[in-house]
Image: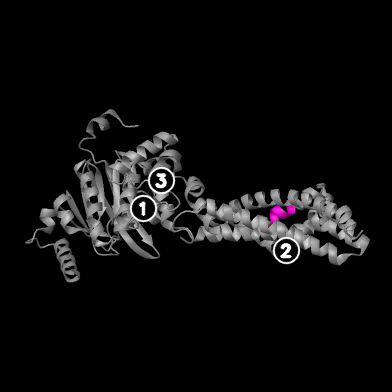
Amino acid sequence: MLTKEATTMTQEKPILRIENISKTLGGKEILKSVSLSLKKGELKVLIGPSGAGKSTLLQCINFLLPPDSGRVWLDGVEIQNRRKRDLYAFRQQVGMIFQDFNLFDHLDALENVAIALRKVKKMRRPEARDRAMAELERVGLEDKINLYPAELSGGQKQRVSIARALAMDPKIMLLDEPTSALDPELIGEVLSVIRDLAHGGMTMILATHQIAFTRSLAHEVIFLENGIILEQGTPAELLSPDACTRSKDFCSRLDDLCEEKG
Amino acid sequence: METAFFTTQLIPALNRGLVMSVKLIVPAGTFGLIFGIVIGTLRTYGPPAIRRVANGYAAVFRGTPLLVQLFILYFGLPNLGIYLNAYWAAVTGFILCSSAYHSEYIRGGLLSIKKGQLLAAQSMGFSTFKTMCYIIVPQAIRRALPGCSNEIIYLIKYSSLAYIITCIELTGEGKIIATRTFRYTEVFLFLGFYYLVLVTMASFMLQKLEKKYKIPGFGQA
């Protein structure tokens, strides 16, 4: 469907573009005309207070929550979410990681990763299992493949869920507070997997409260509050100690909270 | 002489009835459960119009006596040109009735599955239908299995209604002998014992089934 001109321009063109996404839930306007775009290999971090609309925004991008208005492009092709086939094809290319993991409770770790390969990508069972095995090795869980979600720790569950998303060969990943439900000592193992992904060039939007992680890895920080993007810029611009930004205020408040807790 | 009644009359008749009862119970139990799963899923996740129809189905078949349903199937349908023999009328009636009850257990199971399971499947490109088949329903069935087992136990006992529409099964055979010999006490004690054995065997098999599909995190550890 791409014209020649478009194909040659993909390098500069964003891989994902969303425009004027709005969403009202329960009579409350959660997102007010949000736009953003990502280039290949970019990591953008969504920060903002709870209730700012971070989760809603991520779920609107892959139409788990159909936006009331707004448009989404992947690789320059607009997604027609009313066409089921197009929607399902689009979602296969957009990996999503949830705060509470959402592993399939009736399947062991290996099947959790393999099932979509078999049922959605129509791979045959042995190939799907080989691929699942490879992805679980990549997140360091090769010795846990036969355990069920109820037998895994939070950090292990989240790593399985990352392996599950990666097995689909997504073009971009949406990570919705992947470490927020984890005990502090388990956060590191998940962050290190995400760091590997970032170094490997995965395009990602990450909603998180991990400020140090954001400072070191994000290409851009997006500060969302009350459903609008208040500030947007590099971590250096927004989060440096002498920056006069809402983002910095928010983050230093988070840091204070952490210190109090610690 | 006293044992002759049992060995030559009662037990052969009850055994004959037992075969017929099993012929009623096995297909009715199997298809009742399968339809119950489908109807329960449609009642919970179906499109609104189908949801209403499926709810109506459950309301009618749970809300009227099984005996009335059997009478309509056996004596009423011929007026519409549909003729079912006693056996098929009974099996059909049992399937329709037990699937309505199963659907309620399945619905309960479905409602206990967290929405995140659905979101996770859809985020990977599962269609709604595939999400149901491979992710949601397999979990819901595990949660509904104790209730569904209960319904199958009930079915074994209400299958005795078949004799009223002339499908002579266990209870029917017993009743015939009892009226002919006036030995109600012995006949119905024996009959009761046959059902007790049937139900005990069924419970045992259903427990095996529950064990077989047991998974860490579902039910007791």
Q: Amino acid at mark 1?
A: Ser
Identify the secondary structure beneath mark 2: loop
Q: Quadrant of residue B62?
A: bottom right
**Residue under disc 1 on the same chain as residue under disc 3:** yes
- Identify residue for label 3: A81
In terms of depth relative to the viewer, which is nearer, B191 or B63?
A: B191
- Identify residue for label 1: A69
Q: Amino acid at mark 3?
A: Asn
Tag 1 and tag 3, C-beta contact below 8 Å:
no
Identify the secondary structure beneath mark 3: loop
The residue at the far front in this view is B1
Protein chain holding label 2: B
> Would residue B14 appear left or right of B34 to someone viewing this image?
right
Q: Is residue A259 visible?
A: yes
Q: Main secondary structure of the magenta part?
A: helix
Q: Amino acid at mark 2?
A: Thr
The residue at the far top in this view is A4
Q: Is residue B49 visible?
A: no
Residue drawn at x 26%, y 50% as measured from the top left: A205
> Would residue B102 appear left or right of A97 to someone viewing this image?
right
Cα separation, mark 2 vs mark 1, equals 48 Å
User: x%, y% of residue B20?
Assistant: 78, 50
- Identify residue for label 2: B64
- State which mark lies toward you, 2 or 1: 2
User: x%, y% of residue B103?
Assistant: 61, 57
> Would residue A239 appear left or right of B117 to someone viewing this image?
left
Cα separation, mark 3 vs mark 2, equals 44 Å
Label 2 environment density (alpha carbons within 10 Å; few <14, some 14–19, many ≥20): few
Q: Quadrant of residue B144?
A: bottom right
Query: Which residues are the magenta region?
Result: B92-97
**Residue under disc 2 on the same chain as residue under disc 1:** no
Protein chain holding label 1: A
